[in-house]
Image: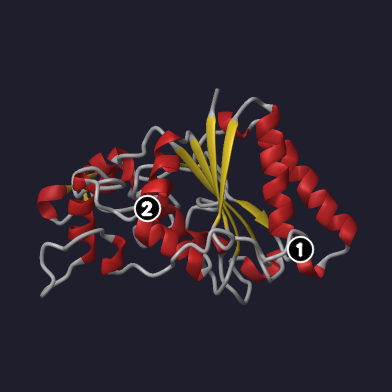
Amino acid sequence: MAKWYMNKTPHLKISGSFNAAAKDAAVDVLTDQSCTVEVSDLYAIKFKATATAEDITGDVKNADHFRYAEETKLAWEEGKLCADITEEQRKLTQADLIIFQFPMYWFTVPAIMKGWIDRVLTLGYAYTPEKRYSQGLFKDKKAMLSFTTGSQESMFSADGINGDMNVTLWPLQNGILHYCGFQVLAPQIFWAPSHVPSEARITMLTGWRTRLHGVLEEKPLSFTPSDCFDGEKGFQLKPEVHEKHAAKEYGLTVGIHLGKALPPNNQMKAGV
């Protein structure tokens, strides 16, 4: 039986939003597949978005020079993180798959979800300098972004006014999810649902339901393995990897492009 954990930021604080409908569809389909589903509705639980010293119960180790990452690592080791962080970490620890459902705000996640990332994915628990990227602590878990946009798909193309969506997704999917070791599934993008007829929104949700029936078997997106980088030389790509790709048309990934053209759909489709 799979453990599936959903982190949700609704589009509006009402049950009739499209993001709420996408969440409901996921819960229904995955529950029907005998998955255990837990949902964290960040607005409903009034999740604190700011990372502060109050996230630690009791005294901090160095109040004069407070460093959040180091202090929360110690608090996690000593069982002194505050209750809301501990509860979210419990859910994440038990999950096989986590889906982030949200409306894209200013080309990224809403502030309350960024706060979840800042506070829950603590040093020691979610990553260490030695255990990150393809060697990350969550390498046996899958994660994906499912979100709505305010702009139509053409505006997020390589020649669209918003720029290539693959570039927009790189900091989220590589810099957060892959950094923690997650196997990152292709994102589920609902293009501008507020600007299309109701029939089109129904079609979007039907497609989402269809995908969810096989989501646990999906292959993840491709990222450059950690062992391709030389840790003794500033984690630069090893010369032999450079040489192997010297004659190729595209770079390795959106971020590690080697000065070449970006590999098409690298952050939107598996196997590319």
Q: Is residue 23 left or right of residue 123?
A: right
Residue, disc 2: 83
Label 1 secondary element: helix
Whole-percent x, y for residue 99 in the image = 55, 46
Label 2 secondary element: helix
Figure colour scheme:
secondary structure
Whole-percent x, y for residue 252 in the image = 39, 50
Q: 176 above or below 78? A: below
Q: Quadrant of the N terminus?
A: top right
Give, as a three-letter code, the residue at label 2.
Ala
User: Can residue 260 be seen at all in this image of the molecule?
Assistant: no
What is the quadrant of residue 137 in the picture?
Answer: top left
Give, as a three-letter code, the residue at label 1.
Pro
> Which disc, if any, is residue 193?
1
Whole-percent x, y for residue 173 in the image = 45, 53
Mark 2 Cα-neighbour bin, 10 Å: few <14, some 14–19, many ≥20 = few
Q: Quick one: which residue is furthest to the top in this view?
A: 1
Q: Nearer the viewer, residue 189 or 194?
A: 194
Whole-percent x, y for residue 231 in the image = 15, 48
Q: Looking at the image, is mark 1 or mark 2 earlier in the sequence?
A: 2
Q: CA distance from mark 1 to mark 2?
A: 36 Å
Q: Nearer the viewer, residue 219 or 58?
A: 58
